[in-house]
Amino acid sequence: MNRRLIWIIAAVVVVAAVVTGVILYRQNQASQNTAYQTLTITRGDLTALVGATGTVRANQTTLLSWQTTGRIQSLDVQVGDMVKKGDVLAQLDPASLPQNIILARADLINAQRALEDLRNSDVSRAQAQLALTQAQKALEDAQENRTNKDYQRASQSTLDQARANYIVAQNQMEKAEENYNVVADRPEDDPVRAALLSQLAAARQSRDRALANLNYLLSAPDEQELAEADARVEVARANLKDAERNWERVKDGPNAQDIAAAEARVEAIQAALQLDSLTAPFSGTISAVNSKPGDQVTPGLSSFRLDDLSTLLVDVEIPEVDINRVQLGQPAKLSFDAIQNKEYNGTITEVGRVGNPSASGVNFTVTIALTDPDENVRPGMTAAVNIVVSQLKNVLLVPNRAVRLRDGQRVVYVLRGAETEPRMVEIEIGATSDVNSEIISGDVLENDRVVLNPPVEFQPGRPPFAR
């Protein structure tokens, strides 16, 4: 009897324990269900952003430095002045310039004249052609003269002329003798006799010269004359070769290399002459003036800073995981710590093609041009930039807080309808913002709830959201 009672009591205890366990389990599950933190899957618009920070810079910036020595005579601008390309900003005193710059003015005239001569190719060609013709004729004459000397000193025409000159001189002398013989018996101091005697003497000299010339031409040339004739032939031949080379050089017009060299010489001299002043290389705003009239300058000394503020740019570094989402022409929003409660617009104008390694990974430089800057935005300011990489309409959105990473796959824990136990669902996401991500695929529907704090048994992987 006692044994039976013991078994009854034991059975009651076991049943009570089981009932108590079931009750406690259900209470625990109910408590756990009510402790889930959830957000609802919705449809909506998504603006995907890539954020970064950068520094404002001008479209162009340069420091204008002197390239010679001298003393500043005039300074025509001050900080804040807007200048155009080519405007003279400062001028040196001509008396303080180095000697080579002073002499360059004369060199420029000669260089420009030489260049002009090269460009006047028609005149050069005509002159070269005339020189060639004359050189050819001179060689022919020299060769003919040398050939004639093998037989006589002169050509037949020259000999005929010499004979004619002798005959004329002989006749004039005979006439002078006849005239003188008429008065030969007069006294020596008779003026007529003296005049006719003088004419006779002159006529005899002319006859003697004509005879000597004729005899010379009729005689054979000596070795010295032959050598001189040979030398004249060689000189004429050399002159002809020079004329031919010159003609070959100019017959097709001016040589491109010669013109390029002449132009380079003119440009070099002009550049040297421009060293006496500083001019604006582009249109912009004077942002710094470091000199004043009377200052002595040396090569490399900077007197001005010039900035082109017509376009303001911001360079930012974008991580490699985001760079393929950034494209030319995409809009961007910019804000500045120094400018409160105002947002500016910009456009992507350049996307770097080569990465820049850094301690945090590989980044790519992206340039944004402000499209609505005002006087408050200045080079050097720090800008917070949000690049709008995509704008989607009516897409299925999941809060980033609910996305987990499990075995390399993005997952969410879903409660659908009256479900009390979350189930794990693998998903593929597309565009993302700071808050939400687009769901491209996965068994997730609009109005499903996603658990932010899934049970421990569902969390063997990493909880944070990762793009």
Image (spheres, grey):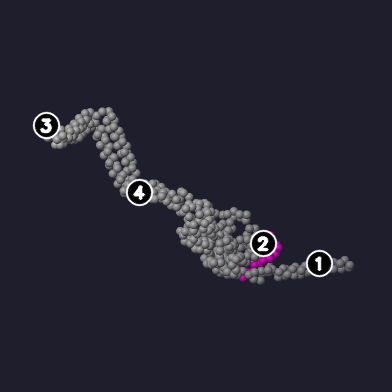
- Residue 198 position, x and y percent, is 17, 35
Q: Looking at the picture, which amino acid does disc 2 mark?
A: Pro
Q: Are marks 4 and 1 in contact (CB under 8 Å)?
A: no
Q: Which residues are magenta?
A: 443-460
Q: Identify which residue is drawn at 71% across, 63% down.
A: 456
The residue to which callout 1 is attached is 14
Q: CA distance from mark 1 to mark 3?
A: 199 Å
The residue to which callout 3 is attached is 185
Tell me, yes or no, whether the highlighted magenta stretch contains residue 276. Answer: no
Q: In the displayed structure, would residue 64 be above or below residue 336?
A: above
- Residue 391 position, x and y percent, is 55, 66
By secondary structure, the bulk of the magenta-drawn segment is best described as loop
Describe the element under mark 2 as helix, strand or loop: loop
Q: Looking at the picture, which amino acid does disc 3 mark?
A: Asp
Q: Nearer the viewer, mark 4 or mark 3?
A: 3
Q: CA distance from mark 2 to mark 1?
A: 41 Å
Of 393 and 172, which appears nearest the observer? 172
The residue to which callout 2 is attached is 463
* Quadrant the C terminus occupies: bottom right
Q: Nearer the viewer, mark 1 or mark 3?
A: 3
Q: Earlier in the sequence, mark 2 or mark 3?
A: 3
Q: Are marks 2 and 1 in contact (CB under 8 Å)?
A: no
Q: Are marks 4 and 2 in contact (CB under 8 Å)?
A: no
Describe the element under mark 1 as helix, strand or loop: helix
The residue to which callout 4 is attached is 117
Q: Identify which residue is drawn at 27% across, 41% down.
A: 134
Q: Looking at the picture, which amino acid does disc 1 mark?
A: Val
